[in-house]
Image: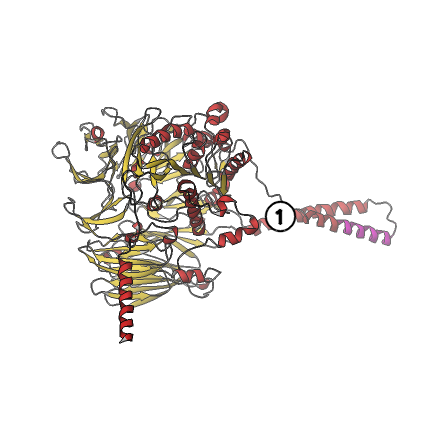
Amino acid sequence: MKQKLIYFLFAYLLVFSSNAQETKDPKPMGWKDIPAWKSISSNSVKMSPDGKWMAYAMLPVEGDGELIIQKTNDPESKKSYPIGSTNSANIEFSEDSRWIAFKEYPKEKEKKANEKGGKPLPEKVILLDLKEDKKTTFEKVASFSFNRELSSHLAINLSKEGSNGDAKGSDLLLVQLASGKKQNLGNVLEFSFNKPGTHMAYIVDAANQSGNGIYLMDINNGKTQVLDSDAASFKSINWTEKGDAFALLKLVKDKKYKQDHGKLIGVKNLSNPQLTVYDPAKDSVNFPKDYTISPNRRAQWSEDQNKLFYGIHPLVLAKKEEKKEDEKTDEDSLKQVETAKLSKILADSTIKSIADLQKAIAKADSSKSENAKSSTEGLKKPDMTIWHWQDTRLQSRQQILENQDKNYSFWAMYDLKSSKHTTLQDSSMKELSLLPKEKFALGTDQRKYELDVNLNGQNFQDIYIVDLSNGEKSLLFENFYMPSYSSFPRASPDGTKLIYGFDGHYFIYDIVAGTKTNITESLPVSFVNVEDDHNVTKPLHGSLGWSEDSKYVLLRDGWDIWQVPLSIREKATNLTQNGRQEKIRYQNRFVLNEEEKGYDWKKAQYFRSYGENTKKSGIVKIEPSRAGLQAGTKILLWEDANINRFSKAKSADVYFFTKEKFNLPTEFYLTDAQISSQTKLTENTPDAHKFLWSSGARLIDYVSDKGDTLQGALFLPANYQEGTKYPTIIYYYEKLSQTLHNYAAPGFSGTGWNPNIYTSNGYAVFIPDIVYTMDDPGMSAVWCVLPGVKEAIKTGVIDEKRMGLHGHSWGGYQTSFLITQTDMFKAAAAGAPLTNMISMYDLIYWNSGGGNMSIFEASQGRFKGAPWENWESYQRNSPVYHVKNVNTPLLLLHNDKDGAVDFTQGIEYYNALRRLKKPVIMVQYKGENHGLSKLENRKDYSVRMMEFFDHHLKGEDASDWIKNGVEKLKLEEHLESRVFGIN
């Protein structure tokens, strides 16, 4: 009886404990909770072409993910499949929507166990029959693909196992989906299906190049043809859009040169394949003898299949050939020395006997040996760089682009009718793009302006039209100014017209007629982006593209969308009309057909709308204009949320969109063309109920000290109670109030910042807008941030005695400057800040290799001219020159390999503060760039930054690294004590 009672009590305690756990109150999210945090990878979300199935990956910050597959009409039909440890899922539906294939990667533990030099771990492909609910697994897979529209086969390229000589290919499994039968093709390096899925082209690359070639399989009957086979390498299969022809390259070793000798292959008429092979080595008339066809650009057919386009690049002699040449030169020199010495011996009158002659010869040989030795030994070429003031690109930029420059190829074409090669560009026109229909190409030349562009950031170039019927180029624009990319010419779908921006207007250039027409001068609005406060002239709002018939363009004036005709007999139409009046920005068009060549103005179009003052967003539908009547705009969705990603199933009228708020994760909703209903499809962040989240967001309206009407986003702490003041982090980066409804997924960012973690832990977060006055980037922050903070304090949410600042990069600069101008803030964390605008101006942006000058004069710096032309402005806005005013404790992050803001900027500010005995801590992560990339470093800094703010703003005990720092000899032990991750 006693035992039964004990058993009953034990069972009761278990049940009670279980129920208590289930009903446990949510807690603040800690950094140690994040490694296991799972959420939907937005890029992985796929809908089947028939709209009946949906698939997406649920990935953790660390650890193993899973793939969720469900019916769109039954959210409860979810099935989960493990996919191992990955940052991006590989998922593909078949075109008939019956099948889905996806990769399963090695598990996190397997990867960690294999970190020390093991072979790459094998990956799997899982094939699911959605109709029969059947699963098939394929081991050791490199890549896979369905045969597109036909959906009858799955091709799987297996990973290369073991050693197979110099073969680059591996086995390819061709799986017949209906029967499950498999066909093995050996040594396949590359394969590609045409769009209809009726044919597969594949390349064999075998040991000793035995059987290397290009093969074509007819999927319907399984017959395979060898189109070309040779002791060569084949690469880059490129089908036409319709899938009725393809091109590729053939590369043959040539010991004389570093590069292979390239040949061009074009294949068309698939039922009876017709091959075009162009060998430039046999073309001594048109092809430049010191060039070859490049492997670095894919060959392609013209749409009419009368031309092939491909890349060419210069030949470079192999090193051994160069060495032989050197040896020959040395040999010639020695011969000359030998002749001179012989002449000297013959002229020596002291030689009286054979013995004297032998001594002279021996002496000459000894001298010869020493001379030869001295000419070949101990001579090493210097390792150095020459920086010249006339270099159009800095040497550092040239070093970054060295491989790109080496591998650069020029466009060329082969005309099948005339059997003629034509080079389309050279170094005088470095950039060239083929326009649609391949009748013309657009080329640019920046050589005359490149130095100045790199110095002051004002972008000029010469633009050419190339006639692809004969390769002749004609100058379209000389000294063309581009205040932003919106001005650059964009081709119509028929390839005969260009839209471009000039002097604040949009123009159309008719290539065939050679005419230029201003299409915006008669409109009642300007298309200049007046809110762009960079030092550029008349930047334009970007156009939204062409109609598919090349008769209209869509333009944005910053508020409304205009449909502008090319014909002078029609008038432009304001499609939205209420944007400017109601402060609604119609931002972009949702492209529902990925294969479209332009929008169909005869059909309804969908656009994203955004309330500039309300921060609402939504989707509007614009009906086409009929019989000259105004197009009708219908609001389908308009909410206090971030509405985005409106998409359509490829082959059905099934739609979905995403919705999120700051404290609610991104979810996907099923709907129809009218958004007449919303069905939630996903359950993102399955562990969200365990944690506390922000109680909501508020919009703060305020006016800057310069009279600008601005806004800020105020995020409430979790469990917010009216009347209670909370410690607050103020964060900024130019203009960010539009993020009011943006969800920030918990994670370890490269800057240590995650607003949802801070609000979960009792902080309020305020993000004010900053707009800029020319020559005052630092003071602009003072004029915008401080009034915004003061206005936010009036809400009663913010404790004005417990405010902290944080920003990274440009935001780090604002932070390091603000604490020189005010003592309002109790602590600040600045990541990778610019601190001396004068010294920074002349430094290098190492990530690109370019100089900082253009950034300061035409981009983010917003200065007029160089420091020596504007000294007071640069000095006035440099934190280091006001360092004596700093009283705010500062946590400074700057990494030694920062390629954006030089490490010396952090050192300069740190040393100045240290010299003045100001409270500053600088953390440096070895080898890291502008942001933290290594997970262990992102974890560490995230925790440290919150510890720093917790101490200064919440009064929590300071960690020892904050109080005393850490000595080098004790650093390893200190770091090991702080490591955490998944179990």
> In this rendering, is residue 413 above or below 211?
above
Task: Judge by depth and name the residue closer to the eye, 339 or 774.
Answer: 774
* Part of the protein shown in magenta: 352-367
> In this rendering, is residue 296 above or below 435?
below
At 34% from the left edge and 30% from the top edge, which residue is drawn?
790
What colour scheme has been applied to the protein in the rendered image? secondary structure
At 60% from the left edge and 50% from the top edge, which residue is drawn?
323
Image coords of residue 65 (percent x, y): 33, 58
Residue 819 lies in what quarter of the image? top left
The count of marks equals 1
Main SS of the magenta part reads helix
Image coords of residue 943 (percent x, y): 42, 48
Q: Is residue 571 magenta?
A: no
Image coords of residue 496 (percent x, y): 28, 36
How many residues crowd around disc 1 within 10 Å: few (fewer than 14), some, or many (20 or more)?
few
Task: Judge by depth and name the residue closer to the eye, 552 or 770.
Answer: 770
Task: Judge by depth and name the residue closer to the eye, 558 or 396.
Answer: 558
Image coords of residue 487 (percent x, y): 33, 31
User: Looking at numbered disc 1 in the image, what kind of residue is underneath it?
Assistant: Asp
Q: Which residue is mark 1?
A: 326
In this view, the residue farthest toward the front is 2
> In this rendering, is residue 60 above or below 304?
below
